Image (tube, rainbow, N blue to C red):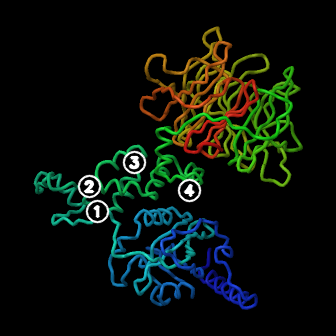
Amino acid sequence: MFDGAVAVKRMRLWEEEEEEEEDEEGMEVDAEAELGWPQWGAPPAAGLGEPRAAAIVVADAVEVDFPVIYVNAAFEAATGYRAHEVLGRNCRFLQFRDPRAQRRHPLVDPMVVSEIRRCLNEGIEFQGELLNFRKDGAPLYNRLRLIPMHGDDGCVTHVIGIQLFSEANIDLSSVSYPVYKQQSNNRFSIQDLNSASHEHAPKIQSSDHCGILQLSDEVLAHNILSRLSPRDVASIGSVCTRMHELTKNDHLRKMVCQNAWGRDVTVRLEMSTKMVGWGRLARELTTLEAASWRKFTVGGRVEPSRCNFSACAVGNRLVLFGGEGVNMQPMDDTFVLNLEAARPEWRQVKVSASHLAVFGGCGQQGLLNDVFVLDLDAQQPTWREVASEGPPLPRSWHSSCTLDGSKLVVSGGCTESGVLLSDTFLLDLTKEKPAWREIPTSWSPPSRLGHTMSVYGTTKLFMFGGLAKSGSLDCASSDAYSMDVSEDSPQWRQLATTGFPNVGPPPRLDHVTVSLPCGRIIIFGGSIAGLHSPAQLFLIDPAEEKPTWRILNVPGQPPKFAWGHSTCVVGGTRVLVLGGHTGEEWILNESYMSSA
């Protein structure tokens, strides 16, 4: 169990050691560096003073309302409150300009407050910036970090708050929040709204009142707007001035994107929003208005030349493995392209212990069904074979994807004798002893090879195309299927897609699919009746009630060849198309940047 008293003693000892170091060295200690804080960037420049020493607060997470049980001297000096005035209270009183106030100051952003409340309820870390006030009413700018502490049973027992206060020279007489300040003489509560529906309740004149506008900004933002889709929030923003000001708040936009796309996606997109903001990013990912083809030239060479290689993105690094060289010679080398470098170039990674990547494929000894993992962050990256029980049949031309970044899914493919497969297997790599598990279904799509499988909505699989079994023939397919692996009994379902005639992608195999952060999927390239397909992009949202194919017209110069390549998503907003018959590297800018 986490001991709050022990933690307090340790922090006091840490403070004493810091003071001794300052006396000995005769210099101030950078609070952020000592605490190991990430560089969040400079706070707004509107009249902020110099940062002060870090204030530390400990709250009891077991008691109701997170009462404070410890504050350090830096907190007392920064806020003007003594420890005995703080202990037992929730820290929200810092949002009140007057100690006797009953509500927080209107300049305190309710979106940040709502995000703090959500993080506390979910027991996760929070980092952000918030307006606070000293005891004398002077405004302070608070760069806050909340760290949950867990007991032996895994439950959160305490929350440690690390605060960097600096003076905020703002005009408190100019109130810009909440946006809607006019008070109605007939303001009513949510209970009034509910009771108004009763036949004996007094009638509310719709010409004089709009029920939803009687709610506070915090309730509107946290309980209503944050639960809508990015497209719906943008539409509501055009209703009136108040809604426009409310919906353009970046914290609200982030909550909307997080609820719509998931926490993992928003974390990957965090770097992108530092340049354009969540509002613009959500719009561009929803409308794809900024999508364009751009040729992307990098240094280094991937030699010998090859096709049918595998590529994936790890953060902003691109990993290329294997492939088929001259005279169908299998390759076993690995190359890495760091797109964060000033001058990105391909570098061959010298690895040992294996000639294979991820799962299966065709080697010098025939078809394979083994699994290998490469740790790029290791000092010496090495392919490591994963010993797994009950592996699927050896195969090639299969399709695979990952769930939650740790579960490998393999579907279909072709055996050594040319038999097409229709099975689906899952391997959880986080287990101490990984074991393959076939996903049992009452019905499966026709056996196939050369198809693609993508993930959307975190737990749903999307399968498209390939060379499929049709009676006694093997024909190129344009069918789409989905499965939710989180269900108790997962089942494949064929998507009844709609659209204008001839709008959907023609039957193809050896194509690529790209899953966008918003859940939509792009189909590109492939082989059609033995010919190179045109570089036409097709878009579908499999989560829609009636999924509809759309042609995505993208400006710019597309790849010259649209077959024999590989693609991957980099940074959540860029789709990198590699290879083809010319060996050129191309980038599809799906969001807001013009280059990698």
Viewer-nearest of labels 3 and 1?
Answer: 1
Which quarter of the figure has residue 556?
Answer: top right
Label 1 SS = loop
Q: Is residue 567 visible?
A: no
- Circles 1, 2 touching at the beta carbon (< 8 Å): no
Residue type at numbered disc 3? Leu
| Whether residue 108 is situated above or below residue 392 in the rendered picture | below
Instruction: Name the one closer to the observer, 336 or 369.
Output: 336
Q: Is residue 51 left or right of residue 387?
A: left
Q: Is residue 148 left or right of residue 352?
A: left
Residue type at numbered disc 4? Lys
Viewer-nearest of labels 2 and 4?
Answer: 4
Q: Pointer 4: what residue?
A: 274
Label 2 SS = helix
| Whether residue 74 is situated above or below residue 303 in the rendered picture | below
Q: Pointer 3: what residue?
A: 228
Residue type at numbered disc 1? Tyr
Which quarter of the figure has residue 453?
Answer: top right
Provide residue 389's location: percent of width, then percent of height.
Answer: 76, 39
Label 4 SS = helix
Instruction: Name the one closer to the observer, 184 or 457.
Output: 184
Q: Pointer 2: what residue?
A: 212
Residue type at numbered disc 2? Ile
- Circles 3, 2 touching at the beta carbon (< 8 Å): no
